[in-house]
Amino acid sequence: MSFPIASVALVNSVLFGVYSNTLLALTATSHQERRAQPPSYTNIFIAGCTGGLLQAYCLAPFDLIKVRLQNQTEPRMQIASSMPRYRGPVHCASSILREEGPQGLFRGSWALVLRDTPTLGIYFVTYEGLCRQYTPEGQNPSSATVLVAGGFAGIASWITATPFDVIKSRMQMDGLKGRKYGGMLDCMASSFRQEGIGVFFKGMTLNSARAFPVNAATFLSYEYLLRLWR
Ligand SMILES: CN(C)C(=N)NCCC[C@H](N)C(=O)O
């Protein structure tokens, strides 16, 4: 449990840090100045995509370890003769390095990049769009607006991210017991052949239901910290 929590914290700090700094570089305005001179949606989209791209690529090994540990069904402690394959995050990383080589740690990273780059652009555009819609010009959004806009931004990003999320998770689990897929395209084609179009929407309802509270809280903390540090 501590590993997924730590990796979410790391992912969010890279994402929001890159997003804010890219927007600063594109618009040359601080967070406070942006209320009076709102950045264009194109700049917000570019900054969001940049944040998504960098967080996905840099943090791909953390996501892979999280997925492998979460999908491990053997018990954690030794019962009879069944030893868990991975005894924790460090053991998981070293086993992947030993058994699958350094590239093994980046398995599924293309699908992760394709999942996160456009969808994080959509994420920040949705958030900003909703905040602007419900906030009088030149003012900061209220906490209720931030919560609702953050929640819907999470839902919009997860609805669009789910097809690549399915492929990413399958690619990351591939390699555990031999290689089943020849690559990302092969994984997409064979999943589609065997399970039909519905395969690309597996988990969408659950992802979206989880996304509302998670991202409402994420954006509330982000806005609060920005106002605190200004
Ligand atoms: C792949 N997608 C859609 C995203 N990363 N979206 C942004 C939300 C991030 C948040 N930590 C969450 O887990 O919902």
Image: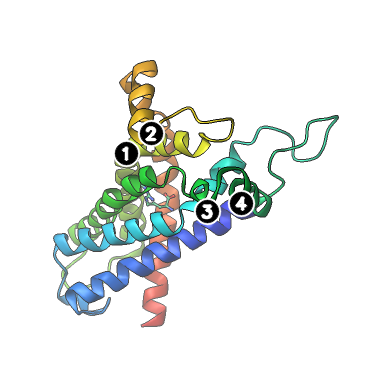
- Comes first in the chain, label 3 or label 2: 3
- Comes first in the chain, label 2 or label 4: 4
Label 2 lies in ligand 1 vicinity (Cβ under 8 Å): no
Give the percent coordinates (x, y) of residue 57: 40, 56
Q: Which mark is residue 62?
A: 3
Q: CA distance from mark 1 to mark 2?
A: 6 Å
Q: CA distance from mark 3 to mark 1?
A: 23 Å
- Which one is nearer the viewer's eye here, 72 or 229? 72
- Which one is nearer the viewer's eye here, 142 or 222? 222
List the residue tagged with mark 1: 159
List the residue tagged with mark 2: 204
Q: Which mark is residue 202?
A: none
| Tag count | 4
List the residue tagged with mark 4: 93
Three-letter code for the amino acid on which mark 2 is drawn = Met
- Comes first in the chain, label 4 or label 1: 4
Q: Of discs 2 and 4, which sits in the foreground?
A: 4
Quadrant containing the C terminus is bottom left
Three-letter code for the amino acid on which mark 4 is drawn = Ala
Quick check: can you spot residue 134?
A: no
Q: CA distance from mark 4 to mark 1?
A: 30 Å
Q: Of discs 3 and 2, which sits in the foreground?
A: 3
Q: Are marks 1 and 2 in contact (CB under 8 Å)?
A: yes
